[in-house]
Amino acid sequence: MFKNLYQYRELLKSNVKKEIRGKYKGSFLGILWSFVNPLLQVLVYAIVFPLILKSPEPNYVVFLIIGILPWTWVTTSISQGTFTILGNAGIIKKVYFPREILPISVVTSGLINFLISCLIIFVFLIFSHIGFSLYLLYLPLVIIAQYMITLGIVFITSAINVYIRDAEYIINFIVNMLFYATPILYSPDVFSGTKFEMLIHCNPFATIINGYRDILFYQTMPNLEMLLVVLGIGVIILLFGIQVFRKLERGFAEEV
């Protein structure tokens, strides 16, 4: 697979560029929506959620941004990636190329958008006087873990959606539910000592969001043990996703 991807690396690059440009094609603000969309989400949650959670975190807006921006990468990649094979049905029927390029392009373009939107986080960290610390060096570890898990999921969902067209709606519902099972709007301490605590600990995205917050917001050492576990889970999900994708891709041309 890696040999094929290397041979078609120019196609991969152009497809990533197409995903980035095509997402906001024809819109007035263009790629600026990468900044505007999460900021609008943060504005809504920053107004509404403190009414539900009586004692939100200090600097709650920064707390929210650090959770919402990585999650936007996850949801955008899964929603677009699930439809990517069907969305490229015309070219799949006519031209041979490694089909893995399609989900990889979606997740990689999401990564680039996330890295660009990280400028928002840095601006808020500066103006809120939180600043930066040397723990920023651990940030790539968290990003790699998130990339592998997201890509593995997209490999699976994009392949299944070709055969089960309702899968797209079921997957979107699951992702929406997962949003509330991930400590994005709240600190995981809210459920400490309750029956929901174990549910949050079993969610790898919870560890990833906590990793971002430890590094950027609390400026402490992230839980390296849990991060390494999540990295291992990411490798397993990615390898499993590749196997599922390669097994199901044999019938893509007929099914799309």
Image (cartoon, rainbow, N blue to C red):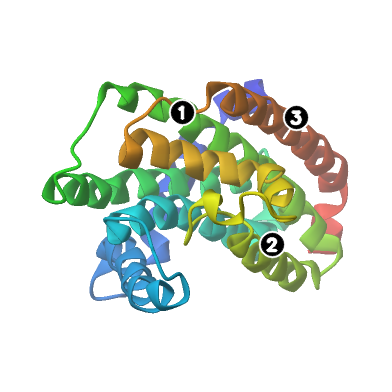
| Cβ atoms under marks 3 and 1 closer than 8 Å | no
Please name the residue shown 45% across and 47% down the image: 109
Kindly indicate the quadrant of the structure image that contains residue 231. top right
| Residue at 30%, 46% in the rendered image | 118
Say few, some or many: other residues with alpha carbon within 10 Å of mark 3 (under 14 / 14 to 19 / 20 or more): some
- Tell me which numbered mark, 3 or 2, is placed earlier along the sequence: 2
Determine whether 198 is above or below 172 in the image.
above
Identified by mark 1, the residue type is Pro
Question: Which amino acid does the dot numbered 3 rest on?
Answer: Ile
Q: How many marks?
A: 3
Element marked by disc 2? helix
Is residue 64 toward the left or the right of residue 232 in the image? left
Q: Mark 2: few, some, or many residues within 10 Å (few <14, many ≥20)?
A: some
On the image, numbered disc 1 is attached to which residue? 222
Secondary structure of the residue carrying numbered label 1: loop
Q: Where does the image place residue 142, in percent across and percent down from the top left? A: 48, 32
Q: Quadrant of residue 242?
A: top right
Mark 3 and mark 1 lie on one chain; the one further toward the N terminus is 1
Front disc: 3 or 2: 3
Q: Which residue is mark 3?
A: 236
Q: Which residue is mark 2?
A: 89
Q: Quadrant of the C terminus?
A: bottom right
Marks 2 and 1, how far apart at CA:
43 Å
Q: Amino acid at mark 2?
A: Ala
Indicate the position of residue 182 as horizontal and vertical percent values. 59, 54
Rendering coords of residue 232 (x, y %): 68, 25
Relative to residue 113, is residue 36 drawn left or right? Answer: left
* Residue 92 percent location from the top left of the image: 69, 54
Inspect this view and state whether residue 96 appears: no
| Between 168 and 43, the one nearer to me in the picture | 43
Query: Which quadrant of the figure has residue 54?
Result: bottom left
